[in-house]
Amino acid sequence: MKKTLILITLLMVILTGCTGGEQMVKSSYATISAAEAKAIIDENDKALILDVRTPEEFEEGHLENALLIPDYELDARAKDELADKNALILVYCRSGIRSAAAAENLAAMGYTNIYDMGGIIDWPYETVG
């Protein structure tokens, strides 16, 4: 009986990852420069460019082929509009603050291939709009 209890306890510790029963969610994304983002976009036509600014900011100018999902709508829209959790997603905003938060949020939702490219104010290449 004592051996069984020890085995069950050991198994529970292993299964919970020694976290005291709390489940840990690992979220990660990479932060890249504008030059690195441009190279990825130029080399990969399947890269999804995600603009998390407001519609008004988007209308003032955005990256070509960017998908607009404002940061405050990301939770509600990601499941439908970003269905592939393994898709290559490059996230940007105006200055880099919202894009970092959005990249962290996407990672927490289970997206696996996320790059925070910072703010459009640091984008030295062409924009549209």
Image (cartoon, rainbow, N blue to C red):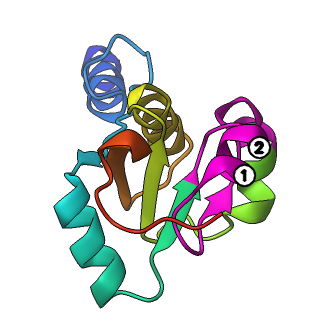
| Residue lying at 50% horizontally and 29% vertically, measured from the top left | 98
Up/down of 59 relative to 85, above or below: above
Q: Amino acid at mark 1?
A: Glu
* Quadrant housing the N terminus: top left
Spatial separation of the CA atoms under disc 1 and disc 2: 6 Å
- Depth check: 8 or 68 in front? 68
The secondary structure type at the circle numbered 1 is helix
Q: What secondary structure is marked by label 2?
A: helix
| Magenta residues (range) | 51-76
Label annotation for residue 126: none
Answer above or below: position of 23 versus 65.
above
- Location of residue 53 in the rendering, given as x and y in whole percent from the top left corner: 62, 39
Residue closest to the eye, 122 or 90 = 122
Q: Residues within 10 Å of mark 1 (few under 14, many from 20)?
A: few
- Residue under the point 33% across and 25% down: 4
x, y percentage for residue 16?
36, 27
Q: Residues within 10 Å of mark 2 (few under 14, many from 20)?
A: few
Q: Amino acid at mark 2?
A: Pro
Residue at left offset 77%, top offset 43%: 55
Quadrant that contains the C terminus = bottom right
Q: Nearer the viewer, mark 1 or mark 2?
A: 1
Is 13 displayed left or right of 50 in the figure? left
The residue that disc 2 covers is 55
Q: Marks 1 and 2: CB-CB under 8 Å?
A: yes
Q: Residue at left 30%, top 44%?
A: 122
Q: Quadrant of residue 11?
A: top left
Tell me: 105 left or right of 97: right
> Which residue is denoted by mark 1 in the rendering?
59
Asked if residue 29 is positioned above or below residue 4 in the image, the reply reads: below
Q: State the count of labels.
A: 2
- Relative to residue 70, is residue 46 drawn left or right? left
- x, y percent for residue 62: 57, 58
